[in-house]
Amino acid sequence: MLALAIPLFTGCTLDSERIDGAAPALAGKFREAAARPASAVAQDWFQAFGSSELTSLARQALDGNFDLAVALARFAQADAQMRIAESALYPQLNGTGDASRTLSPGTARSKFPPFTSSVSNRFDAGLSASYMLDFWGRNQSLAEAGRLGLAASHFDYDTAAVAMLASLANTYFQVLVAQDRLQIARENIRAAENVLGAIRGRVEVGTATALDVAQQETVIANLRVNIPILERQMLQQKNLVAVLVGRTPESITIKGGRLRSLALPTVRPGLPGQLLLRRPDIASNEARLAAAEANIAAARAAFFPSIALTGSGGLSSIALRNLLRADAIALSAAASVTQPIFDGGNLQGQLDAVRGSRNELLADYRKSIVTALSDVENALIGVRKYAEQERAQAVAVETARRAYQITEQRLREGIIDVVTLLNTQTTLFSAQDALTLVRYQRLLAIVSLYQALGGGFTREYSDPMIYEGRATTASTIPVGSTVVPATAVQERP
């Protein structure tokens, strides 16, 4: 991708310092996936889980999330900075107007009295213009850096949107897992209370003791301890969902549901090379690296002469009635050349500084690519291994349930002791809780894979903004899985 970004500076007389081999070498496939290309994931990937409530919350968050509002404000600032940088490419034209009245003392004109003061008037109106010839491309390079800074800010918004949606999905799943664990805990309490009734029945006939009753009551008490813990977790996660949506906790109702009611979408990762076009953080680092190249070109151009053209024209008269006469016209024109000769190393220091910044951004760019590839590999591993773990845990739950049912029946028949029942109860309750947590981890791994693949971001709509040489108007630029509202960005005058 850097090979595409660096040739941006064709408008400069001085070429920027090119970088060869900026991107790390990419393998032909992910280790955890087949070598098959794939389309980018859908921008509304959150719908794939089949939860209408999650879909509604995600759409509300895209409009109301405060982190996205911050990113949008930064985007507007970058748009303004770009226009400031572009202004140097155009002539500057100013209108002037002046009226003055002066009292001159007689002592200023004569050494001897009588001293007679005089009053004079002056009226001026005109235009002044100035233009800095961009012979070496310095202003063009600075404008290019501004446009690329706007592009980087645009990609930062996408990065924030993808991260926010992933965080929202994960937090919503935490609500569901707390609800599932609450339901399991309450069902286990009812089952344990049934067993307690059976044990008390055996006490009455003399086949059980008070110790057996106390042990089962301890099991029930421990199960009840978990209820407020899980309720606290569920309520706090609902409040966090409200914050992500941009609402107060009191103004939103989150019903939740069951983890098992969610779909488990299959996500195709495609090829490593495709990832470079689908990660907004990579795109942002690439744009900043290209902007640093433009800044280097500008710093190099500062060593060469600067040529300025100035001119002014207008009307001047000591009497207002004569201001519009042809005889009142005044004109001037000038050209100046400034060549740095000795500045104590200032220009060289500025060049070295932007080169150092470029090298820092180059390292960040390379790191973002390696990190993105690692994110995908880790997510693929998580999806595969948690699926295997869930299948194994489901078998463990079914086995523990059968053992518990057999044990409970034999306890009622008086064949086994209470200790055996307690062991099978504990095993079943723990296995059920573990199955819920494993399914939750599997859902998180799927969300991580969506995020690692860019969350629906693609470069197709944003590449023209970078490569056509002029940034798109901020009020119409599309961002990530939504479109930046025109009213939320500073309009151009």
Image (cartoon, rainbow, N blue to C red):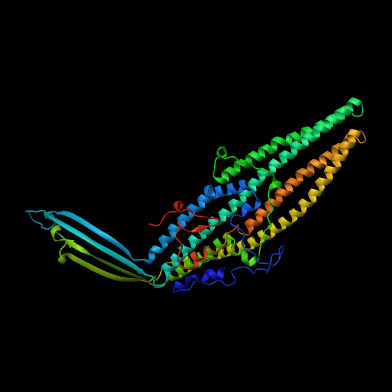
Q: Residue furthest top?
A: 204
Q: Residue furthest left?
A: 114
Horizontal side of 321 relative to 368 (left or right) equals: left
Task: Work out whether residue 216 or residue 150 is closer to the camera in this orientation and state it.
Answer: 216
- Total labels: the figure holds 0
Q: Residue at x 59, y 62 (%)?
A: 278
In what quadrant of the picture does the N terminus appear? bottom right
Q: Position of residue 369 (x, y in %)?
A: 62, 63
Query: Is residue 174 placed above or below 162 in the rendered structure?
Result: above
Please say whether residue 273 is visible from this viewpoint. yes
Query: Is residue 275 placed above or below 442 in the rendered structure?
Result: below
Q: Position of residue 214 (x, y in %)?
A: 83, 29
Q: Residue at x 24, y 68 (%)?
A: 332
Please say whether residue 356 is visible from this viewpoint. no
Horizontal side of 49 relative to 200 (left or right) equals: left
Q: Position of residue 252 (x, y in %)?
A: 57, 40
Task: Work out whether residue 411 or residue 178 is closer to the camera in this orientation and state it.
Answer: 411
Task: Work out whether residue 299 or residue 467 is closer to the camera in this orientation and state it.
Answer: 467
In what quadrant of the picture does the C terminus appear? bottom left
Horizontal side of 2 relative to 470 (left or right) equals: right
Q: To which quarter of the image does residue 257 belong?
A: top right
Q: Residue at x 63, y 61 (%)?
A: 372
Q: Position of residue 37 (x, y in %)?
A: 65, 66
Horizontal side of 150 relative to 126 (left or right) equals: right
